[in-house]
Image (cartoon, rainbow, N blue to C red):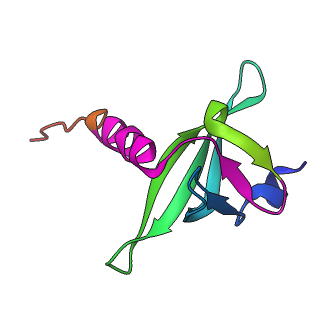
Amino acid sequence: MRASELLGKKVIDKDANEVGKIADIEIDTSTGTIDYLIVSKAGLSFKPKTFPVKIEDVNTIGDYVILGVKPKELEVEEKEEAKKVTLEKTE
């Protein structure tokens, strides 16, 4: 499968809820394997929100990307990713 075929695919969680669409992929350049799918979901604002999904959490890729995790588990990943952000003071 080509990366271009992944982009825009709907992502479905373990409870059969649509959680978003594939917006990007993160590749480990040393191995050439996909580490994360970057999922875009529309929030209440018009700005799309993205969050990473570990490739290990993907059960199937076909017409849809079907995850083996529940929505609450995805929220935890999103919060953990947010903790990694660091701000630097500039003068």
Provide residue 76's location: percent of width, then percent of height: 36, 40
> Taking 36 as reference, is 88 left or right?
left
Q: Residue furthest right?
A: 1
> Taking 73 as reference, is 1 left or right?
right
Location of residue 23 by image quarter: bottom right
Is residue 58 highlighted in magenta? no
Q: Residue furthest front?
A: 15
> Taking 37 as reference, is 62 left or right?
right
The residue that appears at 66% across and 35% down in the rendered structure is: 55
The residue that appears at 68% across and 40% down in the rendered structure is: 58
State the extent of the magenta-drawn residues as a range.
62-82
> Taking 52 as reference, is 26 left or right?
right
Provide residue 78's location: percent of width, then percent of height: 38, 45
Is residue 68 highlighted in magenta? yes
Provide residue 20's location: percent of width, then percent of height: 56, 64
Image: 11 above or below 43: above
Q: Residue furthest left?
A: 91
> In this orientation, which residue lies closer to the viewer: 11 or 42?
11
Mark count? 0
Provide residue 83's location: percent of width, then percent of height: 27, 35
Check the picture and name the quadrant holding the C terminus.
top left
> In this orientation, which residue lies closer to the viewer: 73 or 35?
73
